[in-house]
Image (spheres, helix red, strand yellow):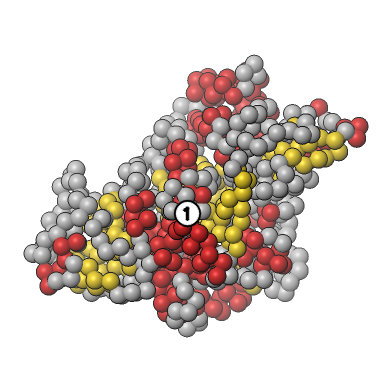
């Protein structure tokens, strides 16, 4: 079956491009013939996600680790991508399986997210060669920055010149356009004036910044170019494609221009092309919005994203540790859908962006939210705001996650324990874990970053000399080494435990002391009870609040939310190796302690 004969693709094209679907399908066929010549078109798409408990995604910039001496890549100075390749080979093979290299293309602003050429590697970072070397030992994730391009992109420059090839490539509106209903994560004016053909002023839609000009997806030629770009990335080794800022893709006057039905159809179209080619490539949507809106990008579970970020997890975990109570985190976690083989969350706590608070708005009271904002500011962070029809509201917290999490007055030992325990919650949840490079290597706030770079997010984007990072990791007394070693141990334990498979069932426990977060992961033969103390206090846990460890679980067994049996066999903590005998009374968790309890007889 050719792509032109694919009824799903054709139906979506007809909905998105009425009157132009035929031309789009011809164009799409030409792209697939060029990128995948001789493709039979009769292979079956992925039946299950290609992830296991051994998978973990590292989120990093391509120039995160800077070689020395400073300067442009030369025969005497390796390119930054070579530094990433070196660290990956020497320290990360046993830790991570996938590297998400944040945009490594030529760009003009926003640390890579204002792309001026989708097809080349930024020469300041290196070339395709180290990326393809990384692909020999790791799977790779690339960003498809598809909502907008740089104002310097050749498409936009052609649009401004009046080149007919690009006449419908970008969104623009008349001066005075009423944008009051438009929802977007920024507060600058929506429309930016540019000088167009004959000196005419064009007011171009710029959701994110004056340098990031929004593409017009009602033009099927734009969609065709983006699909061609996606398939280029697959050719270059990407097994995961992150759809950046996808929620804002489709614009229609009089609507909020977020989560438009045609945006979902656009994601379905990209998924249908991937399924048609039977690629082992997964789509990850980036939609930092309230939880229910976020998970809508799963579609019916098989027709949109394979993965969505678990965006509510970072702010709710942070609030649990700063407030010393896991009640809100527990309430939210109990609403998570059952794990599936066809779709999964990408669980994470930090990334190159700030900590989005919008996904937590349904779970925190206004007072709790205000307390969280004040705590972050007191710990050196910043609060960014966005425009809504109701006015400006907090959008994200710009701070390093470790700096935000623990009281700076605590000892370094307790600060590290709290940070690692927060990561343990993320690692224990059903889904695929992802960890930001600055979390993995134990970084803290780069306080000068916002002033040096001119934007708040720089506080968590410091670029580091490779030699300094390597020296710190080799020094067992350094903070970086202590964090890295503790996380490496947890990741290793996770890899060895079948109950941590991405689609293994989970139950969030209730009836625990308010400071504790409890999660039971299980298979038909295994149980792992994950407990984390989110407070700086010693917290006793009565034996009757602990689910019984005992006989292997028969298929279909429903694990109770809370149960107890003083006579049931004990548990062994996977982290410390100690045995917990609940028959002797209550268990006590030290400040910020995490226990991963497995049945002692297994």
Q: Residue at x 34, y 46 (%)?
A: 335
Mark 1 element type: helix
Check disc 1 and report the residue beneath it. 366
Residue 81, above or below 299: below
Front residue (pair 3, 462): 462
Name the outermost residue toward the top: 19
Q: How many marks?
A: 1
Q: Residue at x 43, y 53 (%)?
A: 364
Along the horizontal axis of the image, is 559 left or right of 14?
A: left
Residue 190, above or below 52: above
Quadrant of the image containing the C terminus = bottom left
Q: Residue at x 64, y 32 (%)?
A: 251
Image coords of residue 150 (percent x, y)? 73, 45
Kindly tell me whether residue 193 is visible in this rendering.
yes
Along the horizontal axis of the image, is 69 left or right of 36?
A: right
Along the horizontal axis of the image, is 426 left or right of 587?
A: right
Residue 6, above or below 69: above
Residue 554, above or below 367: above
Image coords of residue 519 (percent x, y)? 29, 57
Kindly tell me whether residue 215 is visible in this rendering.
no
> On the image, which quarter does residue 469 sit in?
bottom right
Q: Give the crowd class for mark 1: few <14, some 14-19, many >=20 residues within 10 Å.
A: few
Name the outermost residue toward the left: 567
Image coords of residue 109 (percent x, y)? 72, 53
> On the image, which quarter does residue 414 sit in?
bottom left
Q: Residue at x 42, y 79 (%)?
A: 413
Front residue (pair 249, 97): 249
Along the horizontal axis of the image, is 550 left or right of 389?
A: left
Image coords of residue 372 (percent x, y)? 49, 62
């Amino acid at each position: 079956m050719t792509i032109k004969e694919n009824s799903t693709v054709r139906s979506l094209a007809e909905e998105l491009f009425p009157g132009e679907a035929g031309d789009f399908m011809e164009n799409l066929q030409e792209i697939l013939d060029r990128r995948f010549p001789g493709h039979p078109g009769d292979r079956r798409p992925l039946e299950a996600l290609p992830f296991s408990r051994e998978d973990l995604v590292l989120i990093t910039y391509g120039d995160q680790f800077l070689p020395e001496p400073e300067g442009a890549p030369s025969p005497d100075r390796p390119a930054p991508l070579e530094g990433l390749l070196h660290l990956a080979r020497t320290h990360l093979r046993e830790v991570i399986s996938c590297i998400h290299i944040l945009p490594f293309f030529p760009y003009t602003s926003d640390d890579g997210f204002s792309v001026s050429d989708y097809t080349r590697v930024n020469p300041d970072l290196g070339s395709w060669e180290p990326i393809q070397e990384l692909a020999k030992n790791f799977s790779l994730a690339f960003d498809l920055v598809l909502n907008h391009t740089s104002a310097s992109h050749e498409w936009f420059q052609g649009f401004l010149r009046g080149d007919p090839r690009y006449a419908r490539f970008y969104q623009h509106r008349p001066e005075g356009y009423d944008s009051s209903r438009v929802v977007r994560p920024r507060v600058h004016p929506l429309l930016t004036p540019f000088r167009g053909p004959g000196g005419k002023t064009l007011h171009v839609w710029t959701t994110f910044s004056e340098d990031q000009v929004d593409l017009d997806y009602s033009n099927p030629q734009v969609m065709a170019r983006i699909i061609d770009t996606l398939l280029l990335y697959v050719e270059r080794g990407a097994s995961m494609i992150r759809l950046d800022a996808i929620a804002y893709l489709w614009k229609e006057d009089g609507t909020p221009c977020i989560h438009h039905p045609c945006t979902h159809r656009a994601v379905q179209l990209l998924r249908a092309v991937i399924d048609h080619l039977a690629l082992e490539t997964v789509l990850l949507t980036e939609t930092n919005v309230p939880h229910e809106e976020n998970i809508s990008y799963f579609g019916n579970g098989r027709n949109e994203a394979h993965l969505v970020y678990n965006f509510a997890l970072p702010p709710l975990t942070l609030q649990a540790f700063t407030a010393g109570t896991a009640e809100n985190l527990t309430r939210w976690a109990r609403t998570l859908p059952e794990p599936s083989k066809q779709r999964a969350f990408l669980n994470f706590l930090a990334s190159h962006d700030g900590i989005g608070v919008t996904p937590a708005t349904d779970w925190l009271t206004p007072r709790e939210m205000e307390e969280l904002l004040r705590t972050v500011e007191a710990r050196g962070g910043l609060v960014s705001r966005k425009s809504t029809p109701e006015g400006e509201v907090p959008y994200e917290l710009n701070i390093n996650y470790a700096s935000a999490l623990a009281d700076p007055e605590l000892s370094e030992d307790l600060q590290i324990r709290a940070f690692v325990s927060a990561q343990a919650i993320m690692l224990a949840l059903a889904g695929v874990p992802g960890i930001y490079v600055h979390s993995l290597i134990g970084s803290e706030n780069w306080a000068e970053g916002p002033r040096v770079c001119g934007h708040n997010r720089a506080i968590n984007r410091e670029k580091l000399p490779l030699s300094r990072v390597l020296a710190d990791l080799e020094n067992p007394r350094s903070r970086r080494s202590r964090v890295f070693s503790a996380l490496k141990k947890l990741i290793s334990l996770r890899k060895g435990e079948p109950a941590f498979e991405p689609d293994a069932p989970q139950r969030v426990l209730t009836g625990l002391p308010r400071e504790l977060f409890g999660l039971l992961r299980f298979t038909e033969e295994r149980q792992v009870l994950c407990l984390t103390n989110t407070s700086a206090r010693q917290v006793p846990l009565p034996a009757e609040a602990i689910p019984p460890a005992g006989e292997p679980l028969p298929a279909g067994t429903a694990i109770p939310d809370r149960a107890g049996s003083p006579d049931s066999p004990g548990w062994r903590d996977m982290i410390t190796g100690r045995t917990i005998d609940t028959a002797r009374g209550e268990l006590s968790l030290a400040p910020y302690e995490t226990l991963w309890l497995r049945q002692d007889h297994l």
